[in-house]
Amino acid sequence: LRLIEQEQVTTWASLGNMATRVLDHPDFDNYNVSSVTRIGSGGAPTSEQQQKRMTAGFTGTGGSMALGYGLTESAGVGTHNWGDLLTAQPHSVGRVFPAIEITIRDDDNNEIPGGAEGEICIRGTCVMLEYWKKPRATAETMVAGRWLKTGDIGRFDGEFLTINTRARDLILRNAENIYPVEVEHCLQLHPSILDAAVYGLPHAEWGQEIGATIVVPHRFKLNEAELIEFCSARLATFKVPTRWIIQAEPLPRNAAQKVLKKVLATSHTEAIAQK
C-alpha cells in the first residue's frame, strides 16, 4: 500500500489471496490507491464476489478488472478475461491467447466436443519442451502432438474456458463429483468468513467426505450448525461439508499463494482419528 501511494502504481497483478489480504489490511483506507487503473487476479479461483470487492476497493479501475489462466510450464500464458467480457462471464478465465491452443481431453487423451468436461491440455510457442533432466515427469505430462496435460479439469462454453478444479482436488463422495471451488465460493458469500478451503477426507463408506477449514475474525464465534444451514440453502445436500475446522489463523499457503490443501487434509484427518 505504501509503495502504491509513493510510486503511483497503475497496474497490479494479484496472486492467490493477495488482494483480499491488502483489502483487509487495517490501514487500507489510510492510503491513496487511486493511481491503480488496472488490476488482475490469477493463481487461484477468484469468485464474482471477490471480483466486485477488488474493483470497489480500487476505485481507479472503474469497476473493471482481469482474470487469467496459465502455468509455469506455459510461461504463465493461456487465457485472458477482462472488462465487459468478464462482467458477462464472471466464472470464466476467458478466451485463449493467440499462439496458444487449448483442448479438453478424456482419460485416453481423446479430444472432447465443446461443452463437455475433461482435462485441460495446452500447447503453443510458450509451452515448455520438457522438464529439465526429468524424463519420467516429462513423459507423464507431455503427450503426442506436444500437448501438455495441465491436471486441471474444465470445459469450454463457446470461446470461454471455465476451470472446475484440479484433478487431484476433485472429491468423489459416494460416486458424486464435488468441485471444491464451488463450495469455497459458497462459503465466501458468508459475511463473517475471511477465507475458506475445501478438500476430500477419507470415509469408510462413501470413499470420501467433504472437509472444510474456514477462517473467521479473531474471537468471532461461528458454529457448525450455522455453516451447514448456510451451505444447505445454496448447495445440493451432497455438496455440503460434513467435517469442519473453524479458526482465526490464516490458511497455509506456498510461495505462489496457493492453499496447501494436502496439509489441511492431513491435519484434519489426524484430528478426526484422535477423537
Image (cartoon, grey):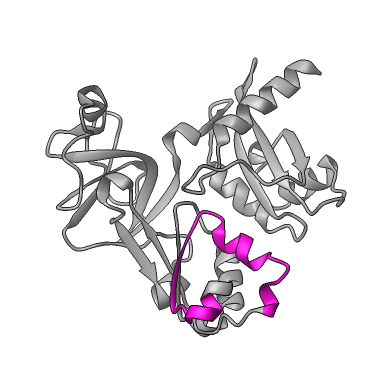
Left or right, residue 265 beside residue 85: right
Q: Which residues are magenta?
A: 4-30
Residue 130 placement (x, y as % from top left) = 19, 35
In the displayed image of the protein, which residue is found farthest to the left?
A: 145
Residue 25 vs 63, above or below: the answer is above
Residue 157 vs 270, above or below: the answer is below
Left or right, residue 12 beside residue 75: right
Could you tell me which residue is drawn at 87 percent across and 50 percent down?
A: 219
Left or right, residue 215 beside residue 164: right
Residue 15 vs 81, above or below: the answer is above
Residue 227 vs 1, above or below: the answer is above
Could you tell me which residue is drawn at 41 percent across and 76 percent down?
A: 83
Confirm whether residue 40 shows in the render.
yes
Q: Give yes or no for residue 92 being in the magenta stretch.
A: no
The C terminus sits in image quarter: top right
Q: Give yes or no for residue 29 being in the magenta stretch.
A: yes
Residue 85 placement (x, y as % from top left) = 39, 73
Give the quadrant of residue 209.
Answer: top right
Could you tell me which residue is drawn at 61 percent across and 76 percent down?
A: 57
Nearest the viewer among 211 and 108 is 211
Left or right, residue 102 beside residue 1: left
Confirm whether residue 158 shows in the render.
no
Could you tell me which residue is drawn at 77 percent across and 43 percent down?
A: 247
Label total for image: 0
Residue 208 placement (x, y as % from top left) = 60, 25
Give the quadrant of residue 149.
Answer: top left
Nearest the viewer among 261 and 24 is 24
The N terminus sits in image quarter: bottom right
Give the quadrant of residue 10.
Answer: bottom left
Residue 112 placement (x, y as % from top left) = 26, 42
